[in-house]
Image (cartoon, grey):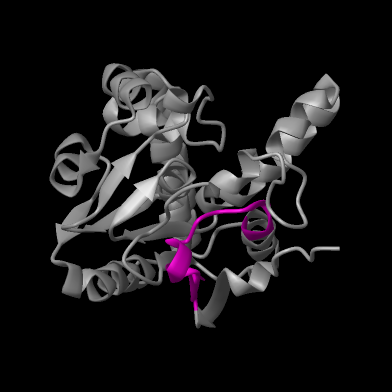
């Protein structure tokens, strides 16, 4: 019997005070993703201590992530895992639950009590692109390039990446990127809002850590309130957003005055 891949062989995480650093650690395979990796990433989200404020996602090697291991779609599948095409035999509820379990690895990065930063170099393809999109902010090396290849393979992007992509670049550009599967360069990513900053490759880790330090410099409660304001802005009218700002500021003023609950 073939053994499953050890989740911890492909991902590790370390705590540095209020910063958590999550690293994809399979550079020989361009950090190709598997359900085992997704289980490990989801577990890290559950294990994260409550006083961690910022999470840095990075990858070893030349590429951030080449996306899903294509062996998942072969009859043999990934050792120790169910071949993906067998998922089609599940009933609706089981199939929905299976995909929902996969998505868990991609969703916790945007939870309200943390700010997440992805440091991207080389290729971020498909699931790799969606993992980077799962983070609040992306810092890119000059050689970073993104591609959403699922639709060209007869699938759809289903790992929670479609909403952040539309939020970042707009519906029309997101549609064009997904349907063509083309490469998006780091320069274009910065221009259209996918990347907050682009730096030479040798400076990527330092730039990402510098940003993390800046995020940690602001008071936590103010960061949480500001993130909530911005996250909800798209669903609110102008007047509703003004009201949300007033309510958030009232909480902050009372907290600073020692009058909070």
The reply, left or right, for residue 53 in relation to residue 189 is right
Q: Relative to 13, does residue 65 appear above or below in the rendering?
A: above
Could you say which is closer to the camera, residue 44 or residue 38?
38
Give the residue at x 54% y 25%: 155
Q: Relative to 58, does residue 164 appear above or below in the rendering?
A: above
Could you say which is closer to the camera, residue 4 or residue 243?
4
Q: Locate residue 152, reporting x and y percent.
A: 42, 24
Magenta span includes 201: no
Magenta residue span? 18-37
Is residue 49 in sight in this rendering?
Answer: no
Give the residue at x 50% y 30%: 157
Quadrant placement of the N terminus: bottom right
Is residue 76 in sight in this rendering?
Answer: yes
Q: Relative to 4, does residue 136 appear above or below in the rendering?
A: above
Q: Locate residue 48, reporting x and y percent.
A: 63, 68
Give the residue at x 24% y 54%: 144
Magenta span includes 22: yes
Quadrant placement of the C terminus: bottom right
């Amino acid at each position: 019997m073939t053994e499953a891949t050890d989740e911890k062989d492909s991902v590790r995480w370390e705590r540095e005070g209020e910063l958590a650093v999550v690293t994809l650690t399979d550079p020989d395979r361009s950090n190709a993703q598997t359900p085992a990796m997704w289980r490990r990433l989801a577990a890290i989200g559950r294990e994260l201590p409550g006083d961690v404020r910022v999470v840095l996602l990075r990858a070893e090697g030349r590429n951030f992530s080449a996306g899903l291991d294509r062996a998942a779609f072969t009859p043999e599948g990934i050792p120790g895992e169910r071949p993906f095409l067998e998922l089609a035999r599940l009933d609706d509820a089981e199939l929905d639950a299976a995909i929902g379990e996969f998505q868990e690895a991609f969703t916790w990065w945007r939870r309200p009590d943390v700010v997440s930063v992805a440091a991207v170099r080389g290729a971020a393809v498909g699931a790799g692109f969606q993992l980077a999109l799962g983070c609040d902010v992306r810092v890119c090396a000059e050689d970073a390039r993104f591609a959403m290849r699922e639709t060209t393979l007869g699938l759809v992007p289903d790992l929670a990446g479609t909403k952040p992509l539309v939020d970042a670049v707009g519906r029309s550009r997101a549609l064009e990127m997904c349907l063509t599967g083309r490469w998006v360069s780091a320069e274009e990513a910065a221009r259209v809002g996918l990347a907050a900053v682009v730096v030479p490759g040798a400076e990527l880790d330092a730039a990402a850590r510098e940003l993390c330090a800046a995020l940690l410099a602001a008071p936590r409660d103010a960061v949480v309130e500001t993130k909530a304001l911005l996250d909800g802005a798209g669903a609110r009218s102008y007047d509703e957003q003004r009201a949300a700002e007033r309510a958030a500021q009232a909480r902050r003023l009372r907290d600073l005055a020692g009058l909070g609950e």
